[in-house]
Amino acid sequence: MSTGLLAFLAFLPILVAMILLLGLGWGARQSMPVGYVVAVIVGYTVWKMSPTVLIAATIEGIWIAATLLWIIFGALLLLSTLKHSGAIATIRAGFMKITPDRRIQAIILCFLFGCFIEGASCFGTPAAVVGPLLVALGFPAFAAVIVGMITQSTPVTFGAVGTPILVGVHGGLTGADAVAAHAQSLGLTWAQYLASIGARAAILHAIIGFVMPLIISMMLTWLFG
């Protein structure tokens, strides 16, 4: 089986869910179980996963989903607390003293504050925190979602104090013969090779990061005037 076909089959559950959600207008309650069934079928027939592995992956998925729902619950709780405590008016007044320009407000909250939160906690927390704050400042809900998700861009690689690099890349590549051979061909130890990956990612994201405030401003101006 070709690599392209394997990649397509791996993406198939997500594609099915997207078609059902966006194309046919199904709700998440109907489309997500279908996507799950497709993932199980592909895993069992194509990747030859045992029932034990499928059950373990299902439990892991439920745990990850519960974690995300917990983050969303915290965001909704934060927004509700801001509303009922009167803090929204205070936050809005404070930002209006800094600047009345919505684009600058979005850059401060989404890019600057969002990147800080991403580096500290990660796992979707910036979007979950920034979104309600933007709504509190009077941004349309759709604008708050779009601009808030832009936060999940350049700082993600080093989120949660570098977890994707220290845990994801380090754990995922450790012990791989091809990776070890490539590092050796470059004359690098494993620690030096890992550091070079982090450095390249940092340089690339730093370059892209220069245009992220511009993208935020363009999205707000283009979509919401």
Image: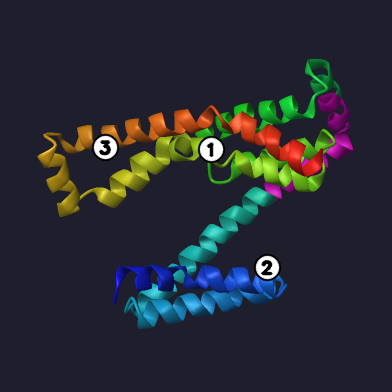
Q: Position of residue 39 (x, y in %)?
A: 47, 75
Tag 2: residue type? Leu
Earlier-in-chain disc, 1 versus 2: 2
Quarter-wise, where is residue 4 in the image?
bottom left
Quarter-wise, where is residue 143 in the image?
top right
In the picture, measured across the screen, residue 223 lies left or right of residue 202, that is right
Residue at the spot 79% in from the left edge and 19% down from the top edge: 99
Which quadrant of the rendered structure holds the N terminus?
A: bottom left
Residues in magenta, as a range: 73-92
**On the image, numbered disc 1 is attached to which residue?**
121
Q: Position of residue 177 (x, y in %)?
A: 15, 53
Earlier-in-chain disc, 3 versus 1: 1
Q: Magenta stretch containing residue 76, yes or no?
A: yes
Crowding at dot 3, Cα within 10 Å, few <14 / some 14-19 / many 20+, comes out as: some
**Could one spot residue 78 in this view of the protein?**
no
Q: Find residue 22 and name its label.
A: 2
Tag 1: residue type? Ser
Residue at the spot 70% in from the left edge and 40% down from the top edge: 219
Q: Is residue 6 above or below residue 164?
A: below
Residue at the spot 45% in from the left edge and 33% down from the top edge: 205
**Could you give the CA–CA distance between mark 2 and mark 3, rounded to whole angstroms?**
39 Å
In the picture, measured across the screen, residue 164 lies left or right of residue 220, that is left
**On the image, numbered disc 3 is attached to which residue?**
194
